[in-house]
Amino acid sequence: MILEEERFNRAKKTKKFPKLSLASGLADLGLSWADIEVLTTPWDQRLLRASFAKLLLRRFPFSLSLAVPRAHASQQNQVVLLNHYLMRDIRRFFGNVKVPPIVNVAHHNAHAAMFFVSPFEEALVLVMDGYGDECSSSAYLGRGSRLERTWTAGIMNSAGLVYTFVTEYLGFAGFGDEGKVMALAAFGEDTFVERFRDVIRPTPDGGYAVNMAYFSYDTFGQLRPFKHKFTAAFGPPRRPGEPLTDRHRDVAFALQTVTEEIVVHMVRALLKRHATRNLCMTGGVALNCVANAKILEQTDVERLWVPPCASDTGAPLGSALWHYHQTLGHARGFELTHALYGKAYADEEIIKALDEAGLGYRRLPQEQLLPRVAKDLADGRIVGWFQGRFEMGPRALGNRSILADPRRPDMRDVLNAKVKKREPFRPFAPAVLVERAHEFFEIDQPDPFMTLAPRVRAERRDRIPAAVHVDGTGRIQTVERSSNPRYYGLIEEFGRLTGVPVLLNTSFNRTEPIVASPADAVSCYLRTGMDVLVMGDFYTTDRGSGALARALDRAQPAPARDAPAEPALSARVTPS
């Protein structure tokens, strides 16, 4: 099982100790603390202490700003004392248990270890994120059950931090809203691209160099990440909620374009040094599905694999993989083919949630359920789709999804108005049967985890207009029958009915973490304009007198930063 605390405490990006997810996992697996031989963590206390000390001493006393209790600085302080906090909180929430030995795995090693569950026997591994214990980007060569690090970039020489701080500069939340900026970039023009190429430059060794003449985050962290040179070049920062202007869209375009160039430059350099043409990408930057697609378009990589939990949500799993394979020497024997490793809920819990909400429902066998839901979708209805175990990672991949018809040009606006209430520039994702993906998208490999945004074939864009972003791409998910037979069956049924084996997919939530339990799903259904709710075999279109009030009582207030405060896009932007 792979569980995230935010799914249980319903607080997005929670930093609280994962007591609920630990308790749930132990209970579901029938384990006690006495059964656990070792705990692994994706941070190396010794390395991080040394890095933090160097940063403080280099710009002392100004660098004391790095120690203020905000965002990543606060996280850094906690990681420095990780083992202490971990042992304390386990005993605090689970009683005076015997805490197993704790093994600290270096952060980028933990990310890189996702190679061990990839489809490759040999591959290059590129890790890019905000920062690790002692580096911000790193490269490895993976063979069998071994990984060898071949290159690193310094902890503050971070393309990931640049993306994060420019995300904040554009009025969004850093360390969380980078995907919004990736989407916004498609609406910009190349006004600032040449200027931004001075901000991050490729280097002859196949790496890159952040031009610190623009930044002061290495001294002041989030308190003052930019020097005057940055605002002189790109203008004043946008405050959250202020109207988006052409300048903001063009800065996003420049950031995304130069990030893509840097990533492609690094991959090309790695390919020159090593014979393999397989690539694993991981770390937070690997969630940039547009940049990932550029790798396949512009390099000699033959197969690219990105795990569904490429960001820090997957680092704990990676630390366990590193310890099991790299340290203990165990052979590989498992491939990650789907992301459905969260918690499952029994039919009794589904019935209880429906009954408590006062909703009428029917229980339908699959041979009746799938045609019924496919017909609903073809008729323009929005469906909440709740099945089995929830997904690990930030994407809804068919078990906690909201589904709709991609053939309807207005469906994105309908979804936003009735359900999601998010920024209008953000796209929705097409889910497609794996064997039919090449008919609609310029792609010749599977992508089960929604990590690539290939171009939609020009001759098919009018068939799935709601799934096409303004730049002509679609953040696809390819669906295999063996990995998720019910989800595959629904898309297949919709394809038989309409001739289009594609569904529009977005996460089952509304300014909250993706739903975990049946009660969460019922609450979200009632608080939004979804037309149909399907949980397991149970089907309802009822909204129930008095049910909405109970749903609102359950809902967590949404953070202000998640509110769709952005106005409609200007007339300058025209779809491609």
Image (cartoon, rainbow, N blue to C red):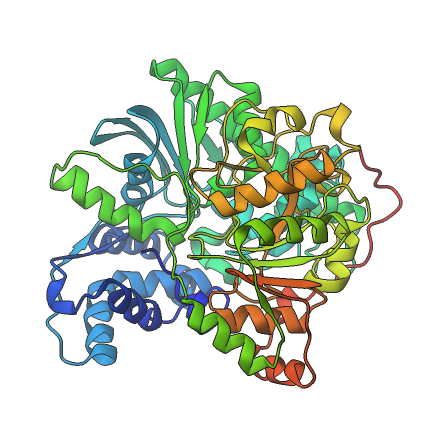
The image quarter containing residue 502 is: top right
Residue 238 visible in the displayed image: yes
The quarter of the rendered structure image containing the N terminus is bottom left
Spot occupied by residue 236 in the image (x, y as percentages of width and height): 70, 54
Judging depth in this view, the residue of 510 and 75 nearest the camera is: 510
Judged left or right of residue 66, residue 400 is right
Q: Quadrant of residue 473?
A: top right
Q: Residue 510's x, y, as percent? A: 62, 65
Above or below: residue 564 compared with residue 575:
below
Q: Is residue 242 visible in the rendered structure shown here?
A: no
Q: Is residue 426 left or right of residue 266?
A: right
Residue 382 screen position, x and y as percent: 70, 57
> 450 or 368, which lies in front?
368
Horizontal side of 51 relative to 572 (left or right) equals: left
In which quadrant will I find the C terminus? Answer: top right
Please give the name of the residue rendered at 76% of the width and 41% of the height, measured from the top-left corner. Answer: 407
Q: Residue at x 26, y 69 (%)?
A: 27
The structure residue drawn at horizontal position 68% and vertical position 56%, both measured from the top left corner, is: 237
Q: Quadrant of residue 168?
A: bottom right
- Name of the residue lying farthest toward the right: 571
Q: Is residue 198 above or below residue 543?
A: above
